């Protein structure tokens, strides 16, 4: 499984278009520390590597459980929380 890296070029095109819309404004020099941003993004990506692939079409079904009452269990079990039964 891989991410669609090619579609990121569309983001670049959109940013250029957005930037052109603000061409009439004075120039600014954003104070972004690219090394710190890069380190933060890479650290986040590393932490997310062992998570479920939420973006993958085969995983999407796990995000949605059956509707309450369609599990074969009474609704009191569904609303009581994991492993607990309200009586």
Image (cartoon, rainbow, N blue to C red):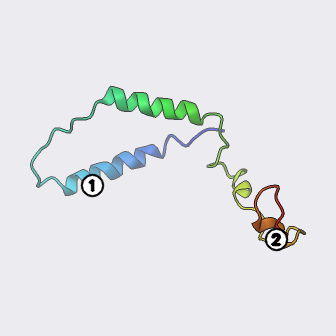
> Is 34 located above or below residue 24 in the figure?
above
Give the left or right position of residue 41, taking residue 45 as reference. Answer: left
Give the left or right position of residue 43, taking residue 60 as reference. Answer: left
> Is 6 located above or below residue 81 in the figure?
above
Of all residues shown, which one is farthest toward the right? 72
Place residue 34 in its image quadrant: top left
Indicate the position of residue 35 as horizontal and vertical percent values: 34, 26
Place residue 84 in its image quadrant: bottom right
On residue 76, the disc is: 2
User: What secondary structure is found at the residue carrying circle 1?
Assistant: helix
Give the left or right position of residue 13, taking residue 55 as reference. Answer: left
Q: Are marks 2 and 1 in contact (CB under 8 Å)?
A: no
Indicate the position of residue 4 as horizontal and vertical percent values: 55, 43
> Is 57 located above or below residue 4 in the figure?
below
User: What secondary structure is found at the residue carrying circle 2?
Assistant: helix
Place residue 27 in its image quadrant: top left
Q: CA distance from mark 2 to mark 1?
A: 52 Å
On residue 18, the disc is: 1
Give the left or right position of residue 34, taking residue 54 as reference. Answer: left
Residue at 78% across, 56% down: 82
Of all residues shown, which one is farthest toward the front? 87
Mark 2 or 1: the one toward you: 2
């Amino acid at each position: 499984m891989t991410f669609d890296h090619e579609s990121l070029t569309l983001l670049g095109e959109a940013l250029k278009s957005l930037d052109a819309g603000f061409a009439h404004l004075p120039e600014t020099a954003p104070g972004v520390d690219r090394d710190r941003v890069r380190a933060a993004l890479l650290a986040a990506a590393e932490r997310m590597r062992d998570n479920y692939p939420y973006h993958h079409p085969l995983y999407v079904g796990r995000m949605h459980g059956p509707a309450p009452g369609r599990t074969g269990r009474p609704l009191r079990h569904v609303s009581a929380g994991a492993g607990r039964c309200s009586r």
